Amino acid sequence: MKEKTVVSDIDRSLYDFRYEEDESEYFDSGLSKEIISAISDEKNDTEWMREFRLKALDIYSKTKMVEWGPSIEGLDVDNIVTYIRQRSRMNTDWSEVPDDIKDTFERLGIPQAERESLAGVGAQYDSELVYHNVRKEVAESGVVYTDLESAMHDEKYADMIREHFMKLVPPTDHKFAALHGAVWSGGSFVYVPKGVKLEIPLQSYFRLNAKGAGQFEHTLIILEEDSYLHFIEGCSAPKYYEAGLHAGCVELFVGKNATLRYSTIENWSKNMYNLNTKRAVVDEGGKIEWVSGSFGSHVSYLYPMSILNGKGASAEFTGITFAGEGQNLDTGAKIVHNAPDTSSYINTKSISKSGGISTFRSAVTVNSNAEGSKSAVNCESLMLDRISRSDTVPVMDIKTDKADIGHEAKIGRISDEAVFYLMSRGLDEESAKAMIVRGFADNVSKELPLEYAVEMNNLIGLEMKGSIG
Amino acid sequence: MDNKKLNILPVPTFGWLKVNYEERENENDNERRVTKLNCSDGEKTRLEINESAAQRYELEVKGGQSVEVIEFITAKRADTQTAIKLESGARARLIQVITGTERTINNVRAFLSDGAELEYISLNIGGEDTLSDINARLDGRGARFEADIGYKVSNEGKLDINLLAEHFGKRTETRINASGVLSEKADKTFKGTIDFKNGAVGAKGKEKEDVLLLDETVRNRTVPLILCAEEDVEGSHGASIGRIDERQLFYMRSRGLDEQTIYKLAARARLDMVIRRIDDEQTNARIRQILGGNDDE
Amino acid sequence: MANLLEIKDLSVSAEEKEILKGVSLTLSENETHVLMGPNGAGKSTLGSTIMGSPEYTVTKGKILFDGEDITELSADKRAKKGIFLSFQNPIEIPGITLSQFLRNAHEQVTGKHTKLWDFKKQLKAAMEVLDMDTSYAERDLNAGFSGGEKKKAEILQLLILKPKLAILDETDSGLDVDAVRTVSKGIDEYKRTTGGLLLVITHNTKILDALKVDKTHILADGAIAAEGGAELVGQVISEGFEKYTKKD
């Protein structure tokens, strides 16, 4: 039985409405229709969005948590409203930001102003300016890059958004998709017209100051035929929120012969429950390329899904997960081959250290209409000590004979010879090990733009500090 | 009658894949007939399991001794448990041939002490609905478990194998090879788990599955897990599912074999690799008779 | 003598890269031809294309065998017409024994069922020529064979299948002196018993010592750069391929 949390000590002033008891089968979450309506009021939601949120709330209340994956015991699901209302306290005081996060900023060499912004302190930071400059440049090519909430009220995009919003990840998908549908706030909207190939990557990084961004943000990207986009979400500096829950949602629509690269280095502060849902649907000849690094959070559930719906569509997933002390990171990928001649390639690395738990979980489904499809999965895990844990849980579900499916997985540790070799060339043990781990992670770092690769390498260096027991 | 969860995956995953467990009607839990197998050192014991009753066979092998048990499971509704306890340095070979059954619930539990060795060979040919749950607990230092599993599923047959090797002891080793062929609405799931427990220093585990799919009506689920809570271990798994590799196909074609012949040969090869390991003339002759053809032997 | 293999203006590409650029060759029954050329000239591509490898696409020209256009035929149909390719890197096929495989191939190529006993006798005789341990017959095809054993197993298949045209792709590469001698003995046996047409692809000459070469073709940059008799082999040995390759 879950314990009821006493709510009296929490400032509920913003959403302090009368809470009505619904049918008994409902899970008591402290969330009510009134609270959701208040969010709608605040956001000036259109009528369909108001209904959408309420319907999602209903689904949330009725949906059970999945029966697999890491424990979310520490998450107060009985009083989920406490996580929602934290949004209003984005503007925390710099002095309240925990020391370890300040320390990490310091070591990553991030300027003070930026640190405060990343920490959600909301100080004046010229990222807005940078963001607007980017926006001007891309706008000339017909690309739309704006925040989702205001785009919804823009008649040019309203219909397009309504047509796509939570169609790929419906609130019925799982409990936290439903929660997202009810309380989502902030996020990006990108539209790339036919034939436009964007040279510069778009980075959501610049938009961290947007109100409410980060915790329940919704990203919607639509690529028309023959277009190209590289979208970068987040960065390697930790995003700090007092609230412990992140339930974002990413929906990507990749048109015919279009290519979308979606890169993320996630480094949530280590008190976060990261229950994020990312999904792409790819048309004929199109391609989705995921580059994904998971370093932060206390618990993560993250399996970007690629649905290959058109002939010849393809998906590539390159990922790394680094689970350190107190972390349980359950990550991987899902691929659905749903058309002929589709191909997928998954290449992941995971590292477990200081009692951290990493799980690689995947599902490759090849439907009977996917003749001529190919899939290759390759995952490697590295155990850095004997108090950590690393699990590999892949599933291949194949429903046609005309497919070629390969899978390889390996688990092991840093070879003593390799450490000895590097030490014989003058490196100390810690640097030698850090270097080997960086090498192990190079599947991801070589896919990232240079500045991100450098930051990721620094991050690995930080995580490896004090690894010599 | 109530349903019973069987073949439970040690670490559950996405529910929609339906690989976490199987559910079947609970038919005969009450009256299980227990047979203690008294095998002397070097002896081969043959069991004909052709009665539709719940059976339990218990085998204890004393230190340093070596025995072989061959189970031919042909009962219409088989419900078989085989419990094996291997003392230090004991060796056992368990061969299971499951064929022509309507429904089989097969359970193997093995406990391996220091230096014990278990060789498990199973051939699944022509069962309609077969569930096999095999668990080897490698408790003692240097214990070794080898599993060779062959299957041929066709004609709407269903096969679900759940194999778990638990490494507790230091320097324990597992090798799992599964290979088979599916056709005509076959539905096969192979779940193979290598579990390195904390303390299994120097343990090694290797797992491989090679599945040949012969037509577009089949369904194959391959679920190879590696669970690891120890640093100094080596684990790997590989799987290859689908058609014959292009290069192999061209090579065999260049010697005059047409595609049909190549697939026939390749399908048989997947089973032959397992049959060879059985290495018992009487059993092999029976298997050949069931599979038909192949006068090269 | 009748023309057995005619290659007419053949262009071949792999992964959209052109490898052969308009190659023409005419080879007659009973002859021995040598195809030489620097690395990357397209020698193996030509051999594989004659055999019908799906890796290569014929973009222009055709291949005639016994007067019949075989350009579109699959490899097994070509094998049945009497073409054999000894692979540079023979493929490993676990689960199928050499004997089992070869017996099936023999039946398909000849269209005749041979009694197991007769076949084994024939196999044993051929293995003796090649100094092969008879246990190899019951081992999985090429699986775990050393480089030398693989090449011997290829020649063994040549002796059993008795094709009209045998293409030997670098059969001598990576072999020590003794192994080259054994393989040569096998090729000699093939020549002597069948009188078949031989096309030897090589970039060295060890294997040619024992053969009476009728014609030599030099392939460079995907085209025939020179043709001549046996004397051309000696010339290439002393001068190398430099004069045939383009200087950039």
Image (cartoon, coloured by chain):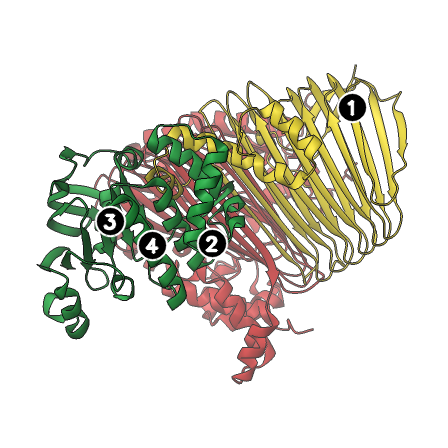
Q: Secondary structure at mark 3?
A: helix
Q: Separation of disc 2 and disc 4 at Cα?
A: 19 Å
Q: Separation of disc 3 and disc 2 at Cα?
A: 26 Å
Q: Residue at x 36, y 57 (%)?
A: C183
Specify the chain shown as yellow: B
Q: Is residue A292 above or below residue A194?
A: below
Q: Separation of disc 4 and disc 3 at Cα?
A: 10 Å
Q: Which residue is mark 2?
A: C132
Q: Which residue is mark 1?
A: B49
Give a yes or no on whether discs 3 and 2 share a subunit.
Answer: yes
N-term-proximal mark, 2 vs 4: 4
**Residue type indicated by callout 4:** Gln
Given the image, what chain letter belongs to the residue carrying mark 2? C
Label 1 Cα crowd, 10 Å radius (few <14 / some 14-19 / many 20+): some
Specify the chain shown as green: C
Q: Quadrant of residue A257?
A: top left
Q: Quadrant of residue A178?
A: top right
Give a yes or no on whether discs 4 and 1 share a subunit.
Answer: no
**Residue type indicated by callout 1:** Ile
N-term-proximal mark, 3 vs 2: 3
**Residue type indicated by callout 3:** Gly
The image shows residue A145 at horizontal and vertical percentages of 32, 46
Q: Secondary structure at mark 1?
A: strand
Q: Is residue A308 left or right of residue B86?
A: left
Q: Is residue A232 above or below residue A73?
A: below
Foreground label between 1 and 2: 2
- Look at chain A in the picture and name its colour: red
Foreground label between 4 and 1: 4
Which residue is farthest top? B1
User: Dots 3 and 2: beta carbons under 8 Å?
Assistant: no
Q: Which residue is mark 4?
A: C88
